[in-house]
Image: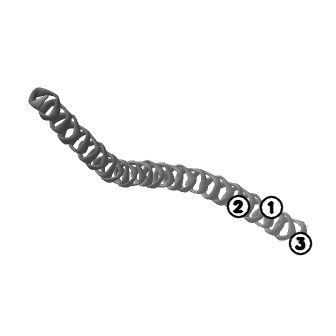
Amino acid sequence: MAELLSLQKEIQVLKREYVHAHRQAEETRKEENDAAVVIQSWFRGCKVRSYISHLLEKAIIIQRIWRGFRARAHFRQMVKTAYFIMKMNFYEAMAVK
């Protein structure tokens, strides 16, 4: 009988320990989950900032190429206009004589 009471007390102690361990595991799981969320958020933020920086660099390259193209086209037009004016001035100068 004493052995049965002893076993029942041990069972009660084991139940309490199990419940305590289970609660502790739940609290730890929540802390770990929150920490994982913070780490994942930081990592995703780093990836997005890196991608935005990459896009910005590529946009600058595209702008540089486009502006160079437009400037060269404008310069070609200015040269054609200047050549035409020089040609017309020469023609006018020769036609008067």
Q: Residues within 10 Å of mark 2 (few under 14, many from 20)?
A: few
Disc number placed over residue 96 in the picture, else none: 3
Q: Position of residue 32 (x, y in %)?
A: 31, 48
The residue indicated by pointer 1 is 84
Front tag of 2 and 3: 2
* Circle 3: residue type: Val
Whole-angstrom CA distance, mark 3 to mark 1, is 18 Å
The residue carrying mark 2 is 74
Is 1 above or below relative to 35?
above
Mark with earlier residue (1, 2): 2
How many angstroms separate mark 1 from mark 2 (CA)?
15 Å
Q: Amino acid at mark 1?
A: Phe
Where does residue 7 sit, x and y in percent of width and height? 16, 30
Say the numbered circle drawn on residue 29: none
SS of the residue at dot 1?
helix
Specify which label sits upstream in the sequence, 2 or 3. Answer: 2
The image quadrant that residue 81 belongs to is: bottom right
Residue at left 82%, top 70%? Answer: 93
Q: Nearer the viewer, residue 44 or 20?
A: 20
Under mark 2, the amino acid is His
Mark toward the start of the polypeptide (3 vs 1): 1
Classify residue 54 as left or right of residue 64: left
Is residue 33 rendered to the left or right of residue 85? left
Check disc 1: other Cα within 10 Å, few if <14, some if 14-19, many if 20+: few
Instruction: Decide which of 62, 1 is in the foreground and name it.
Output: 1
Q: Position of residue 31 (x, y in %)?
A: 31, 53
State the residue in front, 93 or 87: 87
Q: Secondary structure at mark 3?
A: helix
Give the quarter of the image for residue 22: top left
**Which residue is nearer to you in this view: 5 or 50?**
5
